[in-house]
Image (cartoon, rainbow, N blue to C red):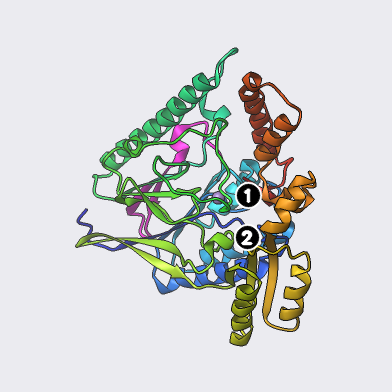
């Protein structure tokens, strides 16, 4: 792209402010991350910050979470970073994000919470202090089913999915065409950047990582061809692990900056920096410091005690998930382990006791494991327990998923334990 000046973009997503870990507040960590990020904008001389959705974990975030977010934006706007682009994710309430839109635009914070009525509103021309264009951003948020799909009565699930995919493709096509037109009019030498909050084909998730399915039917995956071959960078959100789309170096998920669950224990988290300069484009990962150490300890009682003791001796603050896999039934496991860690810097947040659980299951007592199930799994068990006939189950499941989706998007269900 042969720019004479350097232009730097920092891409992050999926902050999930307000998210808890087994009931434990993560306020301290989330604040530490935002402080680090604001300092990084200056240290790395960033020109543009993109946050690709899921700012908040719930569609009705607490006042405390909102104030943390606005404090960050205020601080970031005072750094060297000239432009901030925030798009809505599937966890965010579009109206809540967009309420201060006009005010934030005065700070060069551009918010797109939902699909815009006029496609041009999703195309941003970013300019430097002298007014010269620096980049064009297609700020495309998470596209809700009802925003992009024309529905008709009596559609099957497959019809709906086809129309939804076609709607999303059409949306990207329009916004990218509008952006290309603008770039050509400006002389065609500045980076063309797009955002998205979606599930790209081939993307990786894992059980427990809190990624909620975007659409009913859950098979809507978008392929990389959607974005054309002239994009300079695609800043995606939704998947919580940092990854490339179709192996392309410039089509990226930054992943969540904080561990989402114990599945992330020991795994480092990052933000991405993309830099355009005289010698072309360079993309690198910048590791986010770990603000809360997590560990997952698995084994029989003596193995767990041994490893836990080693952690206690290390003396640093640590949250632990214990997974008991021993043969012996140990109903006193919690007491033993809590006695061991009492007064130390190690806190056990959760004990999974497979032995005890299989006993409980036989007695149909499921209290212990309800919070390990997603609402859809609970529904599936409900169908089975009520001997609902197999041929009507798919239709009932789809209806249930639709209701669930509505609840999430209307904010009636908190995102506390989302599938
Ligand atoms: Mn997310």
* Furthest residue toward top: 154
Q: Secondary structure at mark 1?
A: loop
Q: Is residue 355 left or right of residue 191?
A: right
118 falls in the magenta region: yes
Q: Looking at the rendering, which quadrant does residue 284 occupy?
A: bottom left
Residue neighbourhood size for the residue with mark 2, other residues' Cα within 10 Å, grouped as few (<14), some (14–19), many (≥20)? few
Tell me the residue that label 2 is attached to. Answer: 70
Asked which quadrant contains residue 225, the reply is: top left
In the rendered image, residue 3, in percent from the top left (x then y), is placed at: 23, 57
Label 2 within 8 A of ligand 1 by Cβ: no
Residue at the front extreme of this rendering: 328
Front position in the image: 64 or 76: 64
Question: Residue 56: image x %, image y %?
Answer: 62, 53
Dot 1 crowding, Cα within 10 Å, few <14, some 14–19, many 20+: few
Residue 164 among magenta residues = no
Residue bearing mark 1: 100
The magenta region covers: 114-136
At a point 41% along the width and 36% down the height, the residue shown is 222
Q: Are marks 2 and 1 in contact (CB under 8 Å)?
A: yes
Q: Is residue 55 left or right of residue 187?
A: right
| Depth check, front residue: 57 or 111 | 57
- The answer to whether residue 140 of the structure is visible from this angle is yes
In this picture, residue 190 sits left or right of residue 260: left
Which residue sits at x=68%, y=21%? 389
Q: Position of residue 333 (x, y in %)?
A: 74, 69
């Amino acid at each position: 792209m042969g720019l004479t000046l350097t232009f730097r973009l920092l891409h992050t997503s999926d902050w999930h402010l307000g998210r808890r870990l087994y009931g434990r507040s993560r306020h301290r960590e989330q604040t530490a991350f935002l402080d680090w990020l604001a300092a990084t904008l200056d240290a790395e001389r960033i020109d543009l910050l993109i946050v690709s959705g899921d700012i908040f974990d719930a569609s009705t975030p607490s006042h405390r979470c909102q104030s943390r977010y606005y404090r960050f934006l205020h601080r970031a706007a005072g750094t060297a970073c000239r432009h901030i682009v925030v798009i809505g994710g599937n966890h965010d309430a579009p109206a809540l994000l967009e309420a201060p839109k006009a005010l934030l635009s005065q700070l060069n914070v551009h918010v797109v919470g939902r699909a815009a009525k006029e496609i041009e509103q999703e195309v941003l021309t970013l300019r430097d202090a002298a007014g010269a264009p620096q980049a064009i951003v297609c700020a495309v948020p998470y596209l809700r089913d009802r925003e992009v799909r024309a529905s008709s009565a009596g559609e099957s699930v497959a019809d709906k999915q086809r129309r939804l995919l076609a709607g999303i493709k059409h949306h990207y096509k329009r916004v990218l065409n509008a952006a290309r037109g603008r770039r050509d009019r400006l002389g065609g030498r500045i980076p063309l950047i797009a955002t998205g909050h979606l599930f790209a084909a081939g993307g990786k998730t894992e059980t427990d990582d809190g990624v909620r399915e975007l659409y009913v039917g859950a098979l809507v995956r978008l392929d990389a061809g959607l974005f054309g071959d002239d994009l300079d960078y695609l800043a995606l959100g939704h998947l919580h692990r940092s990854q490339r789309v179709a192996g392309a170096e410039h089509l990226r998920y930054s992943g969540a900056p904080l561990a989402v669950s114990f599945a992330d224990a020991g795994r480092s988290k990052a933000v991405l920096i993309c830099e355009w300069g005289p010698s072309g484009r360079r993309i690198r990962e910048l590791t986010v410091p770990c603000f809360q150490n997590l560990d997952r300890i698995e084994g029989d009682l003596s193995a767990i005690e041994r490893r836990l003791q080693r952690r206690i001796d290390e003396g640093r603050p640590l949250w632990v998930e214990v997974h008991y896999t021993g043969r012996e039934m140990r109903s006193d496991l919690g007491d033993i382990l809590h006695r061991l860690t009492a007064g130390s810097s190690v806190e056990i947040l959760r004990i999974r006791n497979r032995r005890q659980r299989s006993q409980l299951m036989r007695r149909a007592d499921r209290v212990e494991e309800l919070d390990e199930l997603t609402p859809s799994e609970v529904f599936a068990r409900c169908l089975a327990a009520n001997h609902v006939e197999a041929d009507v189950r798919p239709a009932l499941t789809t209806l249930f998923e639709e209701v669930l989706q509505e609840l999430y998007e209307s904010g009636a269900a908190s995102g506390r334990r989302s599938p």
